[in-house]
Amino acid sequence: MDVAASIQLLSAAIIPVLSAITLHEVSHGWAARQFGDRTAELLGRLTLNPIKHIDPVGSVAVPLVLTFLNLPPFGWAKPVPVNARNLRNPKSDMVLVAAAGPASNLLMALFWVLVLVGVLGWSAPSPLSGARRFLLSMAQIGISFNVLLAMFNLLPIPPLDGGRVLRGLVPEALGRRLDALEPYGLIIVVVLLSLGILGKIVSPLVQSVTALFFSFAGL
């Protein structure tokens, strides 16, 4: 991919990527507030302003590098703080707080499906204009990125959301073992990724769910 094409792809990815990671984190904080924890609210993190959530590495550097390497854009934001001790029912409430992030991404993917349907319906049967092609790229990236972010975070490895969901569902003795694993969770993810194991697990799931969302748009 040449530089011009990379810049065009990056431009189309900015809004879908930033909105996905921002809404993901805000959803955790919003869910926590519903169950009694106002930590994120008091720290000013219950805002859709992406600047409040941007992580220099995960929100800027990684997406830039992946785009110029012609790889699917991926990234993350600064985690919204949640104090489980403030939740009314810490163990069960934390399951819903953790699940709120991936759920928000699946809802956002549905939103981009509607955008995609609108662009295709608006343009038919005439050829796509430059603006419509740009919106089409945004919608396609929005669907793919949100599904990828949701599926990745649902991996049952703490501190990912799936790990926190699992923590709330298993007996306390096993839960304590997961707590002990959490400091090494991201290292485990990196090792699995470098060995190609993670891709074999996540890729088929992401492809299947993404294809399902695109089928909603008749593609």
Image (cartoon, rainbow, N blue to C red):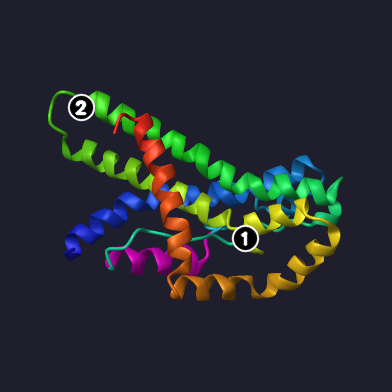
Q: Amino acid at mark 1?
A: Leu
Q: Residue 67 in the image: state x and y as whole percent.
A: 31, 63
For the N terminus, give its image quadrant. bottom left
What stretch of residues is rendered in magenta?
54-68
Q: Is residue 127 left or right of residue 186?
A: left
- Residue 66 is a magenta residue: yes
Q: Residues within 10 Å of mark 1 (few under 14, many from 20)?
A: some
Marked residue nearer the N-terminal end (2 or 1): 2
Q: Nearer the viewer, mark 2 or mark 1?
A: 1
Q: How many marks?
A: 2
Q: CA distance from mark 2 to mark 1?
A: 40 Å
The image shows residue 194, relative to residue 99, as above or below, that is: below
Residue that numbered label 2 is attached to: 123
Residue that numbered label 1 is attached to: 160
- Residue 168 is a magenta residue: no
Residue at x 39%, y 63% (from the top left corner)? 63
Q: Residue 32 in the image: state x and y as whole percent.
A: 74, 47
Between 30 and 52, the one nearer to me in the picture: 30
Q: Amino acid at mark 2?
A: Ser
